[in-house]
């Protein structure tokens, strides 16, 4: 049989016109599940990896939430590259200057030891096949050592980076000839700016025992170091390293002391592209070096294609930019047995838009990347094989080649697969479209379209196009030059139509375009297959009546944007009049063959349409061929879904013996028999990298319950450690949890899917909760004093309440629904006051922007439902936001243990306040983090608070002047009621902490990457000398605690300098009833007690005087 025609390796772009595609996907999508809201029976109490429906998650929803709290959708600038390590180092330096000594408290790492979090990379030690290094996105770098004891597999786990400020490790590589040298990179680039930025790269010269931060990789002015996606270390010289990031390729020859940017995707390839969260073009997401020749390297660029270097990464050229069904994320693998063979696992552009064609493809080159061909599924293959990446190849996409057979690969998407070339099989015939730009003054945006690396759309693969078939697609030339003009349909769009759009959307839908008139444009469109001129339409962004070609601009005033989208029709040109169908809204969609988004090349100073230089944009349809493959699902029930890295370890070729390593959303897995049997790594406890959103404990007992990203909700056994497993009780993504009594529990899954277990009975859906709209990060409001009353929120309905611990739910009407709204169903909060359960705070934003979107508070949230003689419904009040808060979604919400009028709101936007507090039920607010009034150019707190995301606040009930802030770099603490802050540095890893709870006598931390940690509250030293290690700069009377009280309460006060202090108590008639102190005090924070046993119930006032000057007066309530 003759060899099939392969795709030429040129700077051309392909898109399939195969009719088979629609049929394949229509069959394939039939097995995709409904969201868990409609499938409760597949969520509750499931075993991991038992049914396909239970494996599809929502990895993009977390990215949405992370972007929303950072203000990405609101136009705020993201945190600069390397900011986290600079803030962390600044905090350590501040501690050193203050004389603060690191204190190792007796933290207990509770695990779960059997639930690994998301791991992005796994690399074997070249000197020991049973030792592996793992990069986890929340828990840093770990080492696993495999052994066998009494015939049982065992892994010993060691965290290697707990002392570092960024635990978001995503890639690593080891020097083959000097395995002591390891590099790892940070920042999860698949999520783009929606994710937490990394801090560059680290290097170890002692196998991970110690690490050096490579400062050249975290410079704040170079955005391209924000996410490090892959690293390749020279096998013979560990000082030579190539690193690829979201936007560039870097190379060092001095071990990372300095780096050269050898390729800037934004400049060297002239990509342009949409700025902001949607700008996925230019992400260099994979890098593979030939194991036998480091000079030969291949890099994969999202939506562009595959690049090749023949000089060790110093220079790069395109190897393949043509993909039959479009391409977004691409992963590569080079055969060890035949390094001329390179494979690519490709996410098709239909993955995000549910288009009617395959959304996962394989390509292969057998001549070192000089030419490529599609490896299509064999006819008769079961339909799931067409989507082996599971419709989310942007998130999980991995591939490795059989170590002894270059024709066989192992694949990882949601599931694991095996595929191989059909020997002597039938050829596949396709038609493709290539793009050749011969107009040097013109550039095209890559904005996620199906042709030409995302730069050209339209045609029968555009779901919005009408009356266009595969057979009607033809080759087209767009001709520029003197005298080349024609008439075109001019369309306009509504003003502000691009503002605050969801980053996943593809722009304004065609029906949103309004026909304006028929005007002249400075080019002509010709069908070169049939020698006929074609109709043209365009979007007049500036609404100035003309087609314009200006420099790239998608920021600022929208009328100045370069969004002059151009549409080429299949219909014959008519110079005298517009096509009638095109005079309707979005009419150009009928017969739409091609669309593109042009802008003026950066090298061109200006462009005059009356004297345009010669130039041609060629869009040609040509035939091409591929080969067929067979694909099998290689899956079993004990391995977690969502696979991010696959590695093979050759053992013995004659026996076809090799091992496979796999990094996935549940940690790692491995096979010792070529993939037939698999072991999930967390079966051996100790790999504590779970990403928790919330955790709590059994009242009066040491059992724990928590919700995790990717892994659902887990419950521990009694007094667990990091070496013990927890029981999996709920599926999906797990969020807020409640443990009300000995056997009354509540858990939550995405979109307000709330479940409960009463009196030890099986979990059940919580009443009618599914009848309300839900947000992704389900939130629960409850305190022990709430008893059976639980709250949650809905993006549309507002505040929801259950009076019977989830048995039924009803809406609490809001005072102003207009101030509740949110453009994204993401992650608002609801919290019940720890001081008074009748006070409930809820909301998702707290800003004066957009006409005001604000928090709401109720002060009678426990009142009965109206009816049966009750006519006093629960009332809510919209809280006027202060002027200094950002417009982004809030990150956290907390209350005070004794003061019902006090609440805290936390934020995650760079250079803006991170923690604000009200002490008067929301009437006024103060910034506790020291950012108000600080210029954005300075972006440094005035009181030691870091410029970091803050997820929660906890005020210590035994000493309310002590406040802990849960940040993305560990705990920061204040010992003076929020006036000053310092890094706690008390033995907890510098991990992102998302929730702090105090239950009984334990502090419980839910970390996003290192599981659950607890600390006995007695560990927090509350004696005066410890609290007063710094002298306050002002006099202040603090709240008493507890309040209300019976019969004793404690009063704290601050003394700026040695003074005579008097604290006096009065009743509400102004009569003096007690003098609590009347003596000199040194500067510091002091506390006194009042025993009111002899007093009657009621409200009292207490006043502080310093040297006979009244400082403040506060109130307290005695309840007997």
Image (tube, grey):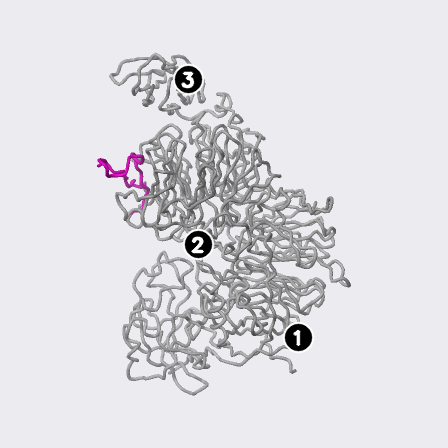
Badge 3 vs badge 1, beta-carbon distance below 8 Å: no
**Residue 444 visible from this viewpoint:** no
Of circles 1 and 2, which is in front? Answer: 2
What is the total number of numbered labels drawn onto the structure image? 3
Q: Is residue 444 above or below residue 920?
A: below
Q: Position of residue 442 (x, y in %)?
A: 45, 72
**Which residue is at a point 39% across and 57% down the rendered structure image?**
502
Along the line of sight, the residue nearer the viewer: 571 or 235:
571
Quadrant in the rendering for residue 899: top left
Q: Position of residue 161 (x, y in %)?
A: 61, 43
Quadrant in the rendering for residue 249: bottom right
Q: Which residue is mark 3?
A: 1088
User: Image check: 960 left or right of 363?
Assistant: left
Q: Position of residue 538 (x, y in %)?
A: 35, 73
SS category of the residue bearing label 2 = loop
Of circles 3 and 1, which is in front? Answer: 1
User: Image check: 192 left or right of 1104?
Assistant: right
Q: Which residue is mark 1?
A: 423
Quadrant of the frame with the C terminus: top left
Earlier sequence position, callout 3 versus callout 1: 1
Which numbered circle lies on residue 39?
Answer: 2
Quadrant in the rendering for residue 690: top right
**Residue 518 visible from this viewpoint:** yes
User: Image check: 402 left or right of 803?
Assistant: right
**Which residue is at a point 35% across and 51% down the rendered structure image?**
773
> From this viewpoint, which residue is outermost toward the right?
654
Q: Which stretch did the figure color magenta?
A: 852-881
Dot 2 crowding, Cα within 10 Å, few <14, some 14–19, many 20+: few
Give the CA distance from mark 1 to mark 2: 42 Å
Along the line of sight, the residue nearer the viewer: 587 or 599:
587
Give the CA distance from mark 3 to mark 2: 57 Å
Quadrant of the frame with the N terminus: bottom right
């Amino acid at each position: 049989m003759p060899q099939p025609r392969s795709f030429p390796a040129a700077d051309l772009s392909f898109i399939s016109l195969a009719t088979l595609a629609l049929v394949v996907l229509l069959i394939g999508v039939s097995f995709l599940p409904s969201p868990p809201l409609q499938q409760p029976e597949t969520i509750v109490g499931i075993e991991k990896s038992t049914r396909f429906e239970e494996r599809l998650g929502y990895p993009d929803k977390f990215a949405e939430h992370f972007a929303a709290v950072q203000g990405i959708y609101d136009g705020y600038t993201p945190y600069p590259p390397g900011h986290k390590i600079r803030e962390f180092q600044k905090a350590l330096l501040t501690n050193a200057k203050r004389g603060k000594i690191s204190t190792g408290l007796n933290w207990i790492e509770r695990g779960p030891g059997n639930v690994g979090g998301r791991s992005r990379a796994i690399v074997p030690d070249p000197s020991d096949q049973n030792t592996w290094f793992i990069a986890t996105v929340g828990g840093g770098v770990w080492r696993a050592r495999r052994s066998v004891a009494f015939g049982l597999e065992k892994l010993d786990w060691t965290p290697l980076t707990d002392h570092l400020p960024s635990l978001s490790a995503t890639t690593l590589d080891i020097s083959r000839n000097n395995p002591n040298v390891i590099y790892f990179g940070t920042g999860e680039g698949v999520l783009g700016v929606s994710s937490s930025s990394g801090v560059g790269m680290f290097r170890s010269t002692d196998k991970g025992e110690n690490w050096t931060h490579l400062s050249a990789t975290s410079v704040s002015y170079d955005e391209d170091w924000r996410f490090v996606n892959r690293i390749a270390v020279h096998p013979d010289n560990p000082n030579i390293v190539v690193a690829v990031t979201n936007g560039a390729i870097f190379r060092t020859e001095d071990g990372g002391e300095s780096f050269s940017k050898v390729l800037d995707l934004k400049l060297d390839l002239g990509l342009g592209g949409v700025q902001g969260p949607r700008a996925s073009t230019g992400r260099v997401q994979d890098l593979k070096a030939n194991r036998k020749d480091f000079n030969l390297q291949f890099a994969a660029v999202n939506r562009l294609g595959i690049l090749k270097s023949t000089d060790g990464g110093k220079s790069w050229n395109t190897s393949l930019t043509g993909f039959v069904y479009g391409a977004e994320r691409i992963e590569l693998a080079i055969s060890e047995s035949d390094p001329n063979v390179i494979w690519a696992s490709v996410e098709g552009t239909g993955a995000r838009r549910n288009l009617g064609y395959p959304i996962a493809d394989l390509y292969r080159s057998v001549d070192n990347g000089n030419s490529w061909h599609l490896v299509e599924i064999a006819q008769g293959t079961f339909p799931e094989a067409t989507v082996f990446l599971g419709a989310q190849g942007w998130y999980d996409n991995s591939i490795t080649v059989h170590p002894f057979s270059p024709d066989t690969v192992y694949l990882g998407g949601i599931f694991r697969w095996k595929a191989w070339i059909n020997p002597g099989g039938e050829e596949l015939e396709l038609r493709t479209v290539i793009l050749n730009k011969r107009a040097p003054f013109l550039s095209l945006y890559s904005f996620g379209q199906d042709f030409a690396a995302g730069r050209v759309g339209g045609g029968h693969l555009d779901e919005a196009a009408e009356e266009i078939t595969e057979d009607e697609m033809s080759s087209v030339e767009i001709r520029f030059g003197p005298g080349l003009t024609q008439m075109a349909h001019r369309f306009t769009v509504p003003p502000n139509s691009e503002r605050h759009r969801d980053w996943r959307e593809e722009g304004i839908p065609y029906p949103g375009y309004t026909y304006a008139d028929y005007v002249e444009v400075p080019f002509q469109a010709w069908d070169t297959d049939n020698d006929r001129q074609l109709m043209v339409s365009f979007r007049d962004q500036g609404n100035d009546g003309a087609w314009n070609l200006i420099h790239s601009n998608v920021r600022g005033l929208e009328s100045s944007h370069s969004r002059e989208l151009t549409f080429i029709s299949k219909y014959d040109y008519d110079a005298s009049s517009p096509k009638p169908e095109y005079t309707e809204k979005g009419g150009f969609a009928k017969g739409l063959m091609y669309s593109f988004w042009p802008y003026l090349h950066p090298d061109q100073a200006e462009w005059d349409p009356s004297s345009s230089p010669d130039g041609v944009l060629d869009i040609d349809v040509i035939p091409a061929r591929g080969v067929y493959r067979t694909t099998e699902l290689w899956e079993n029930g004990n391995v977690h879904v969502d696979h991010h890295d696959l590695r093979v370890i050759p053992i013995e070729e004659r026996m076809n013996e090799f091992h496979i390593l796999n990094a996935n959303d549940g940690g790692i897995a491995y096979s010792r028999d070529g993939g037939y049997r698999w072991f999930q790594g967390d079966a051996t406890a100790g790999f504590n990298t779970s990403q928790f959103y919330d955790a709590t404990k059994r009242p009066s007992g040491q059992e724990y319950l928590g919700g995790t990203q990717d892994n659902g909700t887990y419950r521990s056994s009694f007094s667990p450690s990091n070496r013990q497993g927890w029981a999996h009780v709920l599926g999906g993504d797990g969020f807020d949890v409640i443990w009300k009594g000995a056997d009354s529990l509540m858990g939550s899954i995405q979109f307000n899917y709330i479940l409960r277990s009463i009196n030890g009975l099986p979990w059940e859906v919580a009443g009618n909760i599914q009848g309300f709209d839900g947000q992704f990060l389900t939130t629960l409001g409850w305190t022990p004093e709430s008893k059976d009353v639980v709250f949650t929120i809905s993006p549309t309905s507002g505040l929801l309440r259950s009076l019977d611990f989830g048995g039924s739910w009803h809406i609490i009407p809001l005072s102003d629904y207009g101030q509740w709204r949110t453009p994204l169903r993401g992650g608002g909060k609801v919290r019940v006051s720890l001081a008074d359960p009748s006070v409930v705070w809820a909301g998702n934003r707290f800003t004066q922007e957009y006409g005001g979107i604000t928090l709401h508070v109720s002060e009678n949230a426990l009142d009965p439902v109206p009816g049966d003689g009750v006519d006093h419904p629960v009332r809510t009040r919209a809280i006027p936001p202060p002027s200094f808060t950002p417009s982004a979604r809030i990150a956290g919400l907390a209350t005070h243990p004794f003061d019902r009028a006090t609440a805290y709101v936390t934020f995650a936007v760079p250079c803006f306040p991170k923690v604000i507090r009200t002490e008067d039920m929301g009437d006024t607010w103060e910034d506790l983090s020291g950012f108000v009034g600080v210029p954005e150019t300075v972006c440094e707190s005035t009181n030691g608070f870091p410029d970091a995301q803050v997820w929660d606040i906890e005020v210590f009930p035994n000493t309310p002047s002590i406040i802990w802030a849960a940040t993305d770099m560990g705990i920061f603490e204040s010992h003076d009621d929020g006036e000053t802050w310092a890094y706690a540095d008390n033995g907890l890893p510098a991990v992102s902490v998302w929730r702090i709870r105090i239950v009984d006598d334990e502090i419980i931390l839910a970390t996003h990457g290192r599981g659950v940690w607890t600390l006995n509250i007695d560990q927090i030293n509350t004696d005066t000398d410890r609290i007063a290690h710094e002298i306050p700069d002002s006099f202040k009377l603090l709240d008493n605690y507890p309040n209300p009280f019976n019969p004793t309460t404690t009063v704290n006060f601050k003394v700026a300098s040695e003074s005579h202090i008097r604290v006096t108590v009065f009743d509400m008639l102004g009569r003096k009833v007690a003098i609590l102190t009347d003596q000199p005090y040194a500067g510091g924070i002091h506390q006194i007690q009042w025993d009111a046993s002899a007093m009657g119930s009621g409200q009292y006032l207490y006043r502080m005087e310093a040297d006979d000057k009244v400082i403040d007066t506060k109130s307290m309530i005695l309840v007997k």
